[in-house]
Amino acid sequence: NNCLIELLNSFLSMMPAMFDGMKLAAVATVLYVIVRCLNLKSPTAAPDITYQDTPLNRFLLKSCPILTKEYIPPLLWGKSGHLQTALYGKMGRVSCPHPIGLRKYLPMQDGATATFDLFEPMGDHRTGDDVTMVICPGIGNHSEKHYIRTFVGHSQKEGYRCAVLNHLGALPNIELTSPRMFTYGCTWEFASMVGYIKKMFPHTHLIVVGFSLGGNIVCKFLGENRTNQERVLCCVSVCQGYSALRAQETFLQWDQCRRFYNFLMADNMKKIILSHRGSLFGSATKMEDADLSRLYTATSLMQIDETIMRKFHGHNSLKEYYEKESCVHYIHNVDVPLLLVNSADDPLVHGSLLTIPRTLAEKKQNVIFALTLHGGHLGFFEGAVLVPQPLTWMDKVIVGYANAMCQWEKQKPPCQKSGNLNTSCPEEKAA
């Protein structure tokens, strides 16, 4: 009995030390998880730039130094691609401006009505020229999204007119006028907006900008027909995936929580489609009650694309839809200067898809591919510790690159300017 009492007393005397040890272990575990989840040990670095050594590319990289300088995200959370993406999706931007524009309505041949918002510049452009940004937002987005408003506000201050496409069906207060809404790669509405800008502003130069899905649309638009590139100074695409067929396989995987993001985007697409059920599922439409039933149970973008989206343009299969609407089959036809920007920690764009822009930049002189270490999907926040700055690295890069292209265009001989794609200089004709 004495032995048992002595053992019990010894154990009780050790209890506080044991609890202290457990507390320390718990704290250490939490700190380890935080460091791993927030990726705090990851270094900051300048973007990895792939390009050919040409006079134009050297000029662009020198005149737009932000592309070659270290990108520093907010210290506590900015190295997490998930948090960058989540904050972009929920918060949008900090101190978001409210640019005032005019909404334009463009009737389409199939009865649809395209809309875009037009924002005039707040001052003269630094070159003295008339320059218009023609902008295509991401999936289900429009001119009222915070990241679009922030970019437009910054561009206006730099002397750019901005035209922002509202994806067909994306604006909640605009009814569809035909049984069709936007798809992954339909360029009809964007082409209509660009045609309007060219007609209304015959002396303007165009800077083409696409975000995420919008990047696929603008690159496909430029590559579909060479005439689409007339009066275009350059094109910038941010965070697109280049090939929907290859991307669909990665969207079913759980690494980087991609399957979860797929579910969230599918849920958002489902809400957009159901908000227009009267136009899309009316008695005179191509959609059927069975499609509506399958839509309710869909848990991925692929299921929605198979059930609804591919039918808007009569594609016979999901594979055909993804093949024909992906810019990967058209982007090699783009001859204007092209800046492709992606982030290595983008949870939506799998790393295997980035071989497409890298290979393109290695083969074509007009392409620069910039890959950041951090930034997430359309995040690219900058800031010291916790609170990000109102302008993002992405906003500054696009406008900086556009400014550099305008300067390059200004110093070119008249016969080589973007409005004269089909002409050559007299000395070239003599040669």
Image (tube, helix red, strand yellow):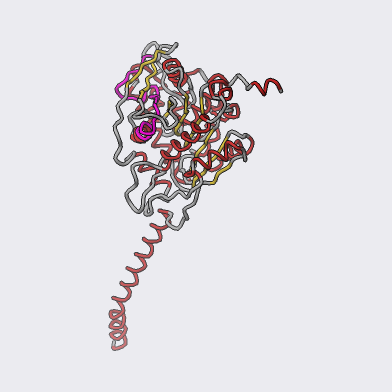
**Outermost residue, right direction?**
431
Please tell me which residue is depicted at 47% across the width and 53% down the height of the picture.
44
Answer left or right for 98 relative to 355: left
Residue 61 placement (x, y as % from top left):
53, 41
Q: Is residue 134 visible?
A: no
Please tell me which residue is depicted at 38% across the width and 51% down the height of the picture.
74
- In the image, the segment drawn in magenta is 153-177
- Name the quadrant of the C terminus: top right
Using the image as rendered, state which of residue 44 and residue 293 is in the foreground.
Answer: 44
| Residue 28 drawn in magenta | no
**Outermost residue, bottom direction?**
2
Q: Is residue 251 above or below residue 294?
A: below
Residue 376 placement (x, y as % from top left):
43, 44
Please tell me which residue is depicted at 52% across the width and 35% down the height of the picture.
339
| Count of numbered marks | 0
- Specify the quadrant of the image occupied by residue 423: top right
